Image (cartoon, rainbow, N blue to C red):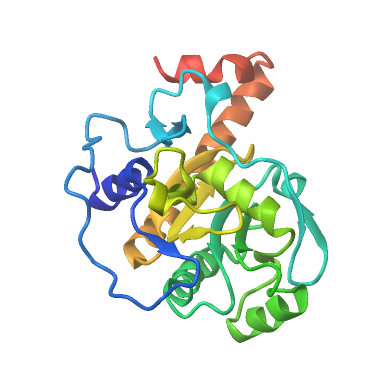
Amino acid sequence: MRKDTRMRTGLAIVGLSFFLLLCKEEKISEEYPKDITDFASYRTERLPFFLGKDMRPDWDRKDQSKARSLEEFSFRDQTGSQFGGKNLDGKISIVSFFFTGCQGICPVLTNKLKIVQKATLDQDDVTILSFSVTPDADTPELLSVYAKKQNIHYKRWKLITGDRGQIYSLARRSLNADTYSAQDAPEEEKLSSKDFLHSENVYLLDTKRRIRGVYSGRMDASMQELVRDISVLRKEILEEKKATDRDPSFGMKFSENESK
């Protein structure tokens, strides 16, 4: 199994490297967890779903109805246009979190995501989403200035702002992007609903908004792996569509047949 694939899956299990909202400058360790699970026994030319509160990867994919997914939302992008979950239906999506005033991990995330933007610029079935975790400050106007400065192409990459509470809820409930507010966290580490620990993780979603991959947003290799996985996911979607066209009932039994 490819090392970067193991790293990506391990990130989903252990929630590697979460950073404070203020994104304080600190040395980012290049060490990876020693207990990353080896998934070498599984086929690599397909992507897992993720299940449960701990987002464990499900390679067998026997019950797609339990797969973690991005919940419905309605916010605004850098042009001030309404943008919601329905805009992602039928699209392959890449999701991250940032804020324009961040001087820590956010510039790294933005630069690494440019690898994905460059690779998908002519691929209209792909959308990159970066949600601001300081939406009160990050107005559409400020996001537009930031986008121009960072050479972000609007047709491919949307910068999202909106109600802070709703963005935090989406990040926590859908993506586990704020683990220090978890119920089992030590009392002194728990945060209020107004606080947020944003992640370096980048999430790959399929056309039904289900999570299909989790990647480190600070590594070129991880972003290159994400680009390759977009192709894997696109192939899966195409094969499912062809099978459904031949047999309309295939969509209902796709997961069961695939796991055999």
- Front-most of 245 and 119? 119
The residue shown at (19%, 42%) is: 35
x then y, percent, for residue 163 = 74, 58
x then y, percent, for residue 147 = 65, 78
Indicate whether 56 appears above or below 99: above
x then y, percent, for residue 205 = 55, 45
Indicate whether 121 appears above or below 10: below
- Quadrant in the rendering for residue 150: bottom right
Q: Residue furthest left?
A: 34
- Front-most of 214 and 260? 214
- Front-most of 63 and 33? 33
Instruction: Identify the image quadrant of the N terminus.
Output: top left
Q: Is residue 60 left or right of residue 83?
A: left
The residue shown at (46%, 29%) is: 52
- Quadrant in the rendering for residue 208: top right
x then y, percent, for residue 174 = 57, 42
Instruction: Identify the image quadrant of the C terminus.
Output: top left
Indicate whether 29 appears above or below 37: below
The residue shown at (33%, 37%) is: 44
